[in-house]
Image (cartoon, rainbow, N blue to C red):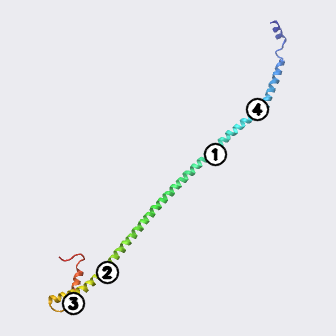
Amino acid sequence: MTTRVLAAETTNFLLPNATFFVEFALFLIVLFVLYRYVVPPLSRALDERQDMVRKQVQDKELAARTLQEARERYESELADARAEAASIRDEARADAARVRTDLREQADREVERIQRQGAEQLAAHRAQTLTQLRTELDGLSTRLAERVIGQSLSDDRRRRATVDRFLAELEHTPAGRGED
């Protein structure tokens, strides 16, 4: 213990100890080694990591913008497609109405043509029947009148007048109604 006290008395506390300078030099060497060999790879790795994160953020923003643009294009094209489908549907309805009207008009014309043709055929058939009746009735009525009267009706004028009167009465009677 005496040696320690003695050593404590001989050192001046204002003067730095020699180990301090050695420790300080070693500290500076460690700092230099760290700054020279450890910090650059670490800062490079951190810079690369920051660049990667920055690039990922930019890619995410670009993807979000691209997605938004695609969504807007999709919605725009969908709206256009719906509008086009509606116009096509309206055109189809208009075409169907036009075709229906055309077919109706064509059917009406066909009905009128058939009715007209039927009326013409009926008139022709009636004229033919009247001609046949005149011919047959002329002969029959002449023979019948000759039997009833007992005279010969060779006068054509009389005979024709009788037949014409009968046919005129026949024409004035409505079709399909006979006298009971």
**Proximity of marks 1 and 2: CB atoms separated by less than 8 Å:** no
Instruction: Single out the mark in the foreground, 1 or 3.
Output: 3
What amino acid is labelled 4 in the image? Val
Distance between the Cα atoms at labels 4 and 1? 34 Å
* SS label for mark 1: helix
User: Which of the image's four quarters has the C terminus?
Assistant: bottom left
* SS label for mark 2: helix
Whichever of callouts 4 and 1 sits on the residue coming sooner in the sequence is 4
Distance between the Cα atoms at labels 3 and 2? 25 Å
**Proximity of marks 4 and 3: CB atoms separated by less than 8 Å:** no
Q: Is residue 71 above or below residue 19?
A: below
User: Which of the image's four quarters has the N terminus?
Assistant: top right
Q: Residue furthest bottom?
A: 155
Whether residue 84 sits left or right of residue 134 in the image: it is right
User: In the image, residue 171 lies at what x, y percent?
Assistant: 24, 81
Whichever of callouts 1 and 3 sits on the residue coming sooner in the sequence is 1
For the residue pair 96 and 54, the one nearer the viewer reads as 96
Q: Is residue 174 above or below residue 11?
A: below
Instruction: Single out the mark in the foreground, 4 or 3.
Output: 3
Query: Which residue bears the numbered disc 1?
Result: 62
Whichever of callouts 4 and 2 sits on the residue coming sooner in the sequence is 4
Residue placed at 81% from the left, 26% from the top?
29
* SS label for mark 3: helix
Query: Which residue bears the numbered disc 3?
Result: 159
Whether residue 110 sits left or right of residue 54 in the image: it is left
Query: Which residue bears the numbered disc 4?
Result: 39
Whichever of callouts 4 and 3 sits on the residue coming sooner in the sequence is 4
Residue placed at 56% from the left, 51% from the top?
74
Residue placed at 21% from the left, 82% from the top?
169
Instruction: Single out the mark in the foreground, 1 or 2.
Output: 2
Query: Which residue bears the numbered disc 2?
Result: 124
